Amino acid sequence: MSSTETTKQQERLRSLKRTGMLETLTWKEARSLFHERQVALIPVGATEQHGPHLPLGTDFMIPSAIATEVAKRGGFVSTPVVPVGSSYHHRQFWGTLWVSPTILMQYLLEIAHSLKYHGIDRLIFVNGHGAGNTFAVQECRQYLRKEGITALVYEWWYGMRDLTEELFRKPAGHADEIETSLMMAIAPSLVCSECFSEAEKGAVNSWGVTHFGAETYFDTIDFSPNGAIGRPTLASAEKGKKLFEASCKQLLDLARWLAKTDDLSIREHVQLEDEAETDAEMKGGDKAQQEKSGRRGGSP
């Protein structure tokens, strides 16, 4: 290989490693990346209806965009997005795909095992679909901890409550002004702005239906005839950019913290004060007995 070819290859590697996007690398380039990085981001989403104005991929496009940007800024690995989640409750709307929470959890566990095999055991699931995926990703991180893998879950709407209230004055819905603003910021060509009025006419103001303190719906169509909850006409790309930037900064801070944190092991049983003293005395007695036995027996 000539010096010019070597230089071009090195430049390519530096450029790709800066993005951290695993799917863009060759296996040799990935080897170099895994030797240098401590944290991997795993974007997880859904392919499901988002009213008549947003694409089916909204819930995986948003976390994928956030994870990709943070990997680039912070020097982390970002895996390809998991595009199908637990969306059974949206199935009456055409194009929605789903897997069960159990299948989703098993799939994520095995991705985590793959990353650990390559040397990364600190992970962040960047989840973009709350109602269906949250249970699976939260259970997944508990299982992984028992296997020596530390996994956290980042959900942009959970971390951005103060900002969403400031920008939108109401809690998040579904295909509402918040998600619509984010999509206008990251994929404006996929947003049907001329459909906003139609979406809002068929939308409801809040998620679900309750009677006497209990949720009495089963599927989204039970309370929203067009799948939208909220007011997409209030959305703007400017608001979306502010929310996207704040989410990226927050996830970047979280990933950097995870990379530097030392004690992530599972804690031992809680002990009462007198139990701790008794254990210490027993251990001291055992040590003294071992030393006494050693003196008596001598060297073998």
Image: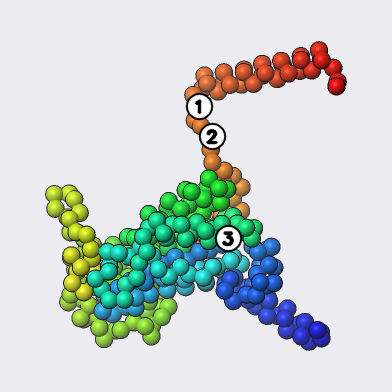
- Residue at 46%, 68% (x, y): give it: 82
Among the two numbered marks 1 and 3 on one chain, the one whose residue lies closer to the N terminus: 3
Residue identified by numbered label 2: 268
Q: Are marks 1 and 3 in contact (CB under 8 Å)?
A: no
Quadrant where the C terminus sits is top right
The three-letter amino acid code for the residue at tag 2 is Glu
The quarter of the displayed image where residue 91 is located: bottom left
Residue 261 position in % (x across, y down): 59, 50
Of residues 199 and 161, the one nearer the viewer is: 199
Element type at marker 2?
loop
Element type at marker 1?
loop
Q: Are marks 2 and 1 in contact (CB under 8 Å)?
A: yes
Q: In the picture provided, is 195 more to the left or to the right than 22?
A: left
CA separation, marks 1 and 3? 37 Å
Residue identified by numbered label 3: 114
Among the two numbered marks 2 and 3 on one chain, the one whose residue lies closer to the N terminus: 3
Q: Residue furthest left?
A: 212
Residue 13 position in % (x across, y down): 68, 76
Residue identified by numbered label 1: 271
Residue 262 position in % (x across, y down): 61, 47
Classify mark 1: residues with Cα within 10 Å, few (<14), some (14-19) or many (20+): few
* Front tag of 2 and 3: 3
- Residue at 55%, 67% (x, y): give it: 78
CA separation, marks 2 and 3? 28 Å
- Residue at 17%, 77% (x, y): give it: 201
The quarter of the displayed image where residue 230 is located: bottom left
Residue 290 position in % (x across, y down): 73, 18
